[in-house]
């Protein structure tokens, strides 16, 4: 193609693979572009068979590719070290399937813009991107998957459902190259648009985490396109960039999810470490402390989500409250004996017990929250009444609808709104004396039981003070069980 001959006269070369991709995408018709963002809906890539044929030309070429920066060259000696690093990292994990994830420095996107502009200039017409990081990423995965599977003896997965680990290979550039290109951007600012220099230095400097959107903003809005193109042309050195490419790898394990029910036996601990000064510990801390020892993970790798919560001074008894634990960076994933983990935990922990421990998944989060709203709970409360009350009056309270304005005690952390709740049943369990008694309350999920007893200055109505026609207060409360 004439375009490549013109570029080669300017000492701009492409490897056989990149040349093939450019040819494929220069032939794409206009209707295959997205008119809204002027981006190709699907960039054309070489087939696996084509890549294999192109491979032979690649290894025989001694030219340096201006687009892929020679990363498609499997004989690149950097890959030998990369493979050794991957083997060392991946052998620490328990897995069956791995997903290959490729990341590139933003410098690649700036180079792609430059080459695209160069081809536009030679052809004398506007083009959408004919080469993007996604082109590079998909081609690399297509070309190297079999190579990595053979060399590492692992199986790669293409979807997120079956994967256990993500193998992340990053092509980054050293800091001095970033600095060089940041200077190019500063010197190319479009002065006609009154661009704020300090804003550019703060928001539009290139770093390893800079995305394509920022490059697009730089090339289309911040800089004068012609000046930027000219400055890159003067200072661009492929040899310098090639010598400053770093190929790194890391492992990102898919979180392990464990669900179960916890029983809180202490009135001195909350569910989480909120208001830590007033707690001995928390359910979260108790579980994390023991689980981190079992899984050999840092305590910061654990996140607890539960179906609702109880107050710090309220015990959670019976079948317990459902929870799900997310464990990040878990090296152990298979052949876990959850019965033994359950038993080991309960033999160590005094304030919290767990039951029904099992492996779970991310979708359980929504289910736990949804089930919590639908459930009915049974409470046992020790209450005070200013006068002796008839047991029959207490036992006659059934199917009572109450309105609860957000309690004063939680108003600082919850929205002010009125909630309609149901007191399904009230029953006297034991009379301690004429002023103190133990009652059983069955109520809908989310009912503020303490406020139902004392009324919360009228914010809960009707309340037990109104129903019993005397002053009432609550001394002790337990969630006895989740009824249904």
Image (tube, rainbow, N blue to C red):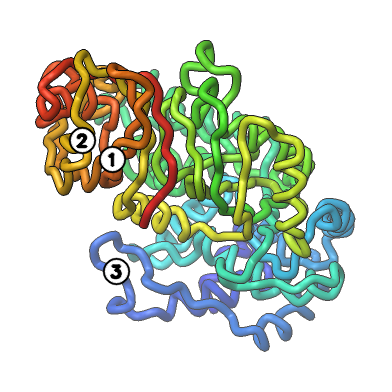
Residue located at (66% from left, 58% from top) = 166
Q: Secondary structure at mark 3?
A: strand
Q: Which mark is residue 427?
A: 1
Can see residue 266?
Answer: yes
Q: Is residue 226 visible?
A: no
Please, what secondary structure does the residue beneath circle 1 have?
A: strand
Residue 55: horizontal and vertical position, in percent? 75, 78
Residue 116: % across, % down: 46, 59
Asked whether the beta carbons under mark 2 and mark 1 sit within 8 Å of each other, the answer is: yes
CB-based contact (under 8 Å), mark 3 and mark 1: no
Q: Which residue is mark 2?
A: 394
- Residue identifier under label 3: 34
Q: Foreground residue, 427 or 174?
A: 427
SS class, disc 2: helix
Name the residue: 65% across, 69% down: 141
Depth check, front residue: 397 or 409 = 397
Q: CA distance from mark 2 to mark 1?
A: 6 Å
Dot 3 and dot 2 residues touching (CB under 8 Å): no
Residue 303: image location, x then y, percent: 56, 40
Nearer to us of marks 3 and 1 is 1
Vertical side of 280 occupied by 479: above or below: below
Instruction: Please state if 298 lies on the left or on the right of 270 as rendered.
Output: right
Q: Earlier in the sequence, mark 3 or mark 2?
A: 3
């Amino acid at each position: 193609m004439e375009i490549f001959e013109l570029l080669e006269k300017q000492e701009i070369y492409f490897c056989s693979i990149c040349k093939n991709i450019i040819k494929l995408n220069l032939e794409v018709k206009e209707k295959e572009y997205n008119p809204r963002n002027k981006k190709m809906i699907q960039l054309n890539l070489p087939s696996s068979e084509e890549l294999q044929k192109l491979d032979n030309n690649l290894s025989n070429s001694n030219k340096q590719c201006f687009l892929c920066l020679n990363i498609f060259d499997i004989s690149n000696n950097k890959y030998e070290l990369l493979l050794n690093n991957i083997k060392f990292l991946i052998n620490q994990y328990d897995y069956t399937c791995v997903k290959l994830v490729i990341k590139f420095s933003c410098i690649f996107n700036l180079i792609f813009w430059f080459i695209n502009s160069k081809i536009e200039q030679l052809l004398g017409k506007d083009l959408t991107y004919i080469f993007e990081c996604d082109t590079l990423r998909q081609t690399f995965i297509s070309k190297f998957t079999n190579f990595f599977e053979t060399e590492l003896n692992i199986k790669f997965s293409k979807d997120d459902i079956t994967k256990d680990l993500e193998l992340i290979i990053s092509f980054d550039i050293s800091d001095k190259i970033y600095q060089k290109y940041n200077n190019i951007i500063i010197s190319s600012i479009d002065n006609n648009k009154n661009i704020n220099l300090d804003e550019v230095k703060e928001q539009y400097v290139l770093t390893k985490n800079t995305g394509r959107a920022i490059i697009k903003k730089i090339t289309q809005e911040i800089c004068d396109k012609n000046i930027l193109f000219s400055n890159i042309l003067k200072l661009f050195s492929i040899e310098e960039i090639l010598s400053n490419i770093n190929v790194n790898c890391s492992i990102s394990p898919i979180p392990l999810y464990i669900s179960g029910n916890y029983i809180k036996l202490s009135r001195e601990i909350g569910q989480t470490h909120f208001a830590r000064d007033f707690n001995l510990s928390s359910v979260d801390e108790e579980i994390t402390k023991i689980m981190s020892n079992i899984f050999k993970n840092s305590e910061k790798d654990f996140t607890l989500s539960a179906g609702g919560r109880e107050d710090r001074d309220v015990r959670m008894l019976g079948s317990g409250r459902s929870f799900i634990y997310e464990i990040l960076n878990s090296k152990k994933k298979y052949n876990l004996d959850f019965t033994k983990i359950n038993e080991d935990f309960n033999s160590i922990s005094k304030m919290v017990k767990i039951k029904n421990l099992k492996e779970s998944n991310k979708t359980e989060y929504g289910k736990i929250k949804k089930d919590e709203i639908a459930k009915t709970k049974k409470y046992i409360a020790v209450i005070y009444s200013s006068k002796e009350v008839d047991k029959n009056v207490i036992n006659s309270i059934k199917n009572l609808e109450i309105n609860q304005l957000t309690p004063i005690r939680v108003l600082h952390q919850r929205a002010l709104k009125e909630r309609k709740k149901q007191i399904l049943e009230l029953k006297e369990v034991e009379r301690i004396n004429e002023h103190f008694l133990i009652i059983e309350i069955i109520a809908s999920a989310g009912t503020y039981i303490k406020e139902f007893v004392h009324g919360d200055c009228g914010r809960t109505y009707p309340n037990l003070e109104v129903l019993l026609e005397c002053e009432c207060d609550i001394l002790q409360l337990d969630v006895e069980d989740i009824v249904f």
